[in-house]
Image (tube, grey):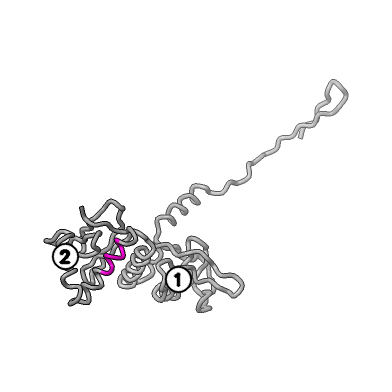
């Protein structure tokens, strides 16, 4: 440390000090970790925790951290939760009596945690729920065919790529080789003989009555 007399009679003190900037966090490593986590289907735990379902201590790497809410569970409990779910959207199972989590599992988490058969069941459930919620949905009239579509008001035909058959949206039926008039005439001829035809004809009359369908010009 040096002391120098200034012209004004005051001492000016100068010192040689080694100044270091505060150590910054390794932002590059943190960013790389976030990017890596984003591309992973599931995020594993890095520390010991107790599963909120089975109350078992879960070692690092043996549990799952849910992306949307960060709640942690063991793999087995989450897989069973997905398999027993009757809803297309699988919610977080955390519920301690005071707080119930309203977050949901992402599709990539579900796919990574369950078998292919369970995942296919989940997809089928999602498709059925989406179909039931859409006012402009139509299910293929071929028996046991899972095909369905959503349609605009100006569309009269749905070709099902599952069973490769063409559905008439006006008649709500498959009548390949016949136009709508011929099909309706056939229905009227069978209406007192065939119960299925009676139901189809009644459905068509209701559609015509409420303006949901119109006769082919």
Please give the name of the residue rendered at 63% of the width and 41% of the height, measured from the top-left corner.
21
Q: Name the residue under label 1.
A: 62
Is 57 in front, or is 161? Answer: 161
Range drawn in magenta:
202-208
In this rendered view, identify the residue nearer to me: 202 or 163. 202
**Coordinates of residue 176 in the picture (x, y in percent):** 14, 62
Residue 12 covered by magenta stretch? no
Residue 121: image location, x then y, percent:
33, 71
Residue in the picture at 25% in, 59% down? 170
Above or below, comparing residue 161 to residue 96 in the picture = above
Give the residue furthest to the top.
Answer: 7
Mark-to-mark CA distance, 2 and 1: 66 Å
Q: How crowded is mark 1: few (under 14 residues within 10 Å), some or many (20 or more)?
A: some
Q: Residue 185 carries which label?
A: 2
Q: Quadrant of the rendered structure where residue 195 is?
A: bottom left
For the residues carrying marks 2 and 1, which lies nearer the camera in this image? Answer: 2
The kind of secondary structure the magenta stretch mainly shows is helix
Callout 2: SS:
helix
**6 relative to 124, above or below:** above
């Amino acid at each position: 440390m040096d002391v120098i007399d200034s012209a004004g009679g005051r001492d000016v003190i100068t010192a040689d000090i080694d100044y270091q900037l505060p150590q910054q966090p390794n932002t590059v490593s943190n960013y790389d970790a976030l990017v890596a986590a984003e591309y992973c289907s599931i995020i594993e735990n890095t520390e010991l925790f107790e599963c909120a379902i089975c109350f078992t201590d879960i070692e690092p790497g043996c549990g799952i951290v849910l992306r949307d809410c960060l709640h942690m569970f063991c793999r087995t409990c989450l897989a069973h939760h997905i398999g027993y779910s009757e809803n297309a959207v699988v919610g977080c199972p955390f519920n301690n009596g005071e707080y119930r989590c309203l977050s949901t599992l992402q599709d990539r988490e579900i796919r990574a945690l369950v078998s292919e058969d369970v995942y296919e069941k989940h997809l089928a459930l999602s498709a059925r729920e989406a179909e039931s919620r859409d006012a402009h949905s139509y299910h293929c009239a071929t028996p046991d065919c899972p095909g369905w579509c959503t349609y605009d008001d100006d569309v009269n035909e749905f070709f099902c790529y599952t069973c490769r058959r063409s559905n008439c949206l006006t008649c709500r039926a498959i009548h390949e080789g016949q136009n709508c008039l011929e099909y309706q005439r056939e229905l009227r001829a069978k209406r007192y003989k065939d119960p299925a035809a009676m139901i189809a004809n009644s459905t068509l009359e209701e559609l015509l009555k409420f303006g949901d369908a119109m006769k082919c010009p």
